[in-house]
Amino acid sequence: MHPAEQQMQFVYTLRSRGVMNAEVLKAMEATPRADFLEGIFRERSFEDTPLPIECGQTISQPTVVGLMTQALEVTRRCKVLEIGTGSGYQAAILSRLARRVYTVERHRRLARRAKDLLLKLALHNITVVHGDGSLGLPEQAPFDRILLTAAAEDPPQPLIDQLRPGGIMVLPVGQSSAVQTLIRIEKTEAGLDYTDLGPVRFVPLVEGVAHDVLE
Ligand code: SAH
């Protein structure tokens, strides 16, 4: 298939699976997923499946990226925190919708690669931080939006604390070995409002930074 056709098919798949927000679709169209993949996986970038990246991690399924981004209701005024940079794909999409994006990754190697790539793509409103995202990023808090792209058993309290009143957080919760649930939390004056967005499958949120042999 011709790349332009593949791109049309890609957007069609996103729409048919519930990613309807025009701004989100535009941001995804402007962000070729192949840029965030390596080797043999580049040519599979249009497939609506997660694919392997370095350090035994995965780039998420495009539909899930779209649905999470849509549920986050990002506006130009938002300061966004993402936990789990991975390839940087989700961060790149967020950066086209938000004012500022901070993204935290526990694997130094992934953080470094994503930082280089995002600079190369001239996405200058993203800061990649190597660290333990389960602690959030207190020095930049509060955030208008928080997105986790790794599954926690429960929403980490530091992240809830770092969400601005009126803010929205989207995350997968549940055991890493089982099907997890994507949830949306809105911080209101009355407390936390939870919405269930359906089943998903993510790599687990692991506490602490990684100590990889080859870094
Ligand atoms: N958003 C990524 C995909 C994420 S895969 C993308 O667009 O490509 C989940 C990532 O979360 C992995 O890279 C994993 O290393 C990272 N991760 C897991 N636990 C973490 C933690 N406590 N802090 C920061 N990153 C974490």
Image (spheres, grey):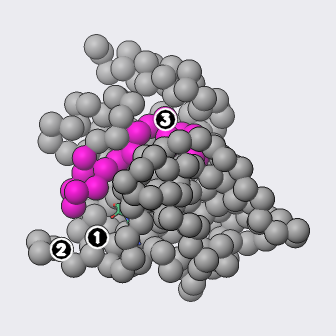
Q: State the image coordinates of residue 168 (x, y, percent, origin top left).
A: 70, 60
Ligand 1 location (quadrant): bottom left
Q: State the image coordinates of residue 170 (x, y, percent, origin top left).
A: 61, 56
Mark 3 surroundings within 10 Å by alpha-carbon count, few (fewer than 14), some (14 through 19), many (20 or more): many
Return the residue at label 2: 212
Mark 2 surroundings within 10 Å by alpha-carbon count, few (fewer than 14), some (14 through 19), many (20 or more): few
Return the residue at label 1: 107
Is disc 1's CB within 8 Å of ligand 1?
A: yes
**What residue appears at the point 43 percent right and 18 percent down from the top-left corner?**
9
Q: Secondary structure at mark 2?
A: loop
Mark 2 or mark 1, earlier in chain: 1
Is disc 2's CB within 8 Å of ligand 1?
A: no
Mark 1 surroundings within 10 Å by alpha-carbon count, few (fewer than 14), some (14 through 19), many (20 or more): many
Return the residue at label 3: 63
Q: State the image coordinates of residue 196 (x, y, percent, origin top left).
A: 66, 47
**What residue appears at the point 28 percent right and 55 percent down from the top-left corner?**
57
Mark 3 or mark 1, earlier in chain: 3
Mark 2: which amino acid? Answer: Asp
Q: Which residues are magenta?
A: 52-69
* Label number found at residue 118: none
